[in-house]
Image: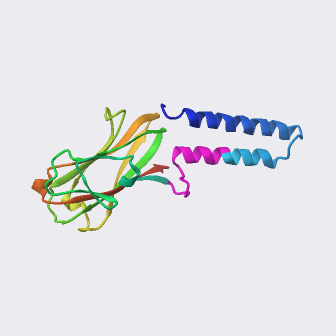
Amino acid sequence: MDRDYPASLAMSFLNALVTALINAAVTGQVAWHWPAIAFALSFIFLLGYQGVVSLAFRPFKRWRIAEGELISLRATKKGLVWEFDRDSKEGDGFHGPYMPLFRGKYRVSFRLRIDERSEQDQPVCELDVTADDGRKWLAQRTISIRDFTRAEKWQDFPLDFILSRDENRVEFRLRMKDALMAQRRISFQSVALRRRLS
């Protein structure tokens, strides 16, 4: 993948170091705790790079608007959130972060809020996950007014997807439906990505 060369080089170096230390330990040149330490460092690096754990040892990576990896289309910035007002046009939204992902099972959660809720089945936005600059669809979900449990309360909307092979340029997108017809304001706070075991 395009952006994996530095990590591959680092992993190759760590693997070579572990192998050399194991060989040295077998011949009695170093104590056995050195190969164990090198293996642990290699394993932690691999997990950290693949996003299984972050620096805070949480099992996800989270993107917020202040980090600059998400690109907005006509959203209003209000503090640390983006707002899509009632006069938002269809197609307004955001996309990003255009990252490589290893094959595996994932769940991405979009943290959203609506200003007014009802049982109306009017769609307000569409969430999706794509790769290869939008040419490969991985998951999609339409959110309607009644999908929100309460007004003015943050809620996570998950999307599960599986990568059968490594992918480049993975992006998470929100696209507004006709907000003028729905007469609702949608706010976005963050996108969180997790690895799934099943």
Q: Is residue 47 magenta?
A: yes
- Toward the right, the furthest residue is 28
Location of residue 157 by image quarter: bottom left
Q: Nearer the viewer, residue 148 or 61?
A: 61
Residue 191 in view (yes/no): no
Residue 40 seen in the figure: yes
- The verdict on residue 178 being magenta is no
State how many labels appear: 0
Tell which residue pokes out farthest to the left in this image: 181
Is residue 152 placed above or below 165 in the rendered structure?
below
Query: From the viewer's perspective, is residue 118 above or below residue 132?
Result: below
Q: Residue at x 48, y 31 (%)?
A: 2
Residue shown at 15% from the left, 48% from the top: 89
Q: Between residues 108 and 93, which one lies in front from this camera angle?
A: 93
Question: Magenta region: which residues?
Answer: 42-59
Q: Report whether 102 appears left or right of 144.
A: right
Q: Residue at x 26, y 59 (%)?
A: 187
74 vs 58, nearest the viewer? 74
- Quarter holding residue 168: top left
When the figure is inspected, residue 156 is found, relative to residue 167, above or below; the finding is below
Q: Position of residue 172 (x, y in %)?
A: 34, 45
Q: Is residue 179 left or right of residue 151?
A: left
Snapshot colouring:
rainbow
- Report the residue at 36% width, 56% height from top: 190
Residue 117, horizontal then vertical, whole percent: 19, 66
Asked if residue 85 lies left or right of residue 10, the reply is left
Q: Position of residue 9 (x, y in %)?
A: 61, 33
Q: Is residue 11 left or right of residue 29?
A: left
